[in-house]
Image (spheres, rainbow, N blue to C red):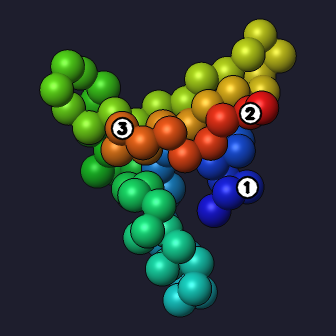
Amino acid sequence: MHALLLRGVTAVATAPADPALRSALDRSGLLPARQAPPLEPGARADFAVFDEHGACLATVVAGRLLHRRA
């Protein structure tokens, strides 16, 4: 999951088949892509911030900072 968050993933297309990965996915707060709500005031915040080279600087899921590049 950290590898996904490191790349700016805030939603997944399908749940993984591996039960351990599915459990990690549930704990992370990531939603299936079709259920991810739009970013708007007062709504759940799921987004990533990238630098000018495309590297992920931060990943926020459900308003929680889950990855931040040091």
Q: Closer to the observer: label 1 or label 2? A: 2
- The kind of residue on which mark 1 rests is Ala
Residue, disc 1 = 3
Tell which of 48 and 69 is nearer to you: 69
**Looking at the image, which residue is at 53% across and 73% down?**
24
Picture disc at residue 63: 3
14 to the left or right of 43: right
Residue 1 vertical position relative to residue 33 in the rendered view, above or below: below
Query: For the residue labelled by badge 3, is the local secondary structure a helix, a strand or a loop?
Result: loop
Residue 7 vertical position relative to residue 26 in the rendered view, above or below: above
40 to the left or right of 31: left
Within the image, what quadrant is residue 49 found in?
top right
Query: For the residue labelled by badge 1, is the local secondary structure a helix, a strand or a loop?
Result: helix
- The kind of residue on which mark 3 rests is Gly
Query: For the residue labelled by badge 2, is the local secondary structure a helix, a strand or a loop?
Result: loop
**Looking at the image, which residue is at 23% across and 21% down?**
40
- The kind of residue on which mark 2 rests is Arg
Residue 58 vertical position relative to residue 49 in the rendered view, above or below: below
Label 1 or label 2, whichever comes before in sequence order: 1
**Looking at the image, which residue is at 77% across and 32% down?**
70
Within the image, what quadrant is residue 8 found in?
top right
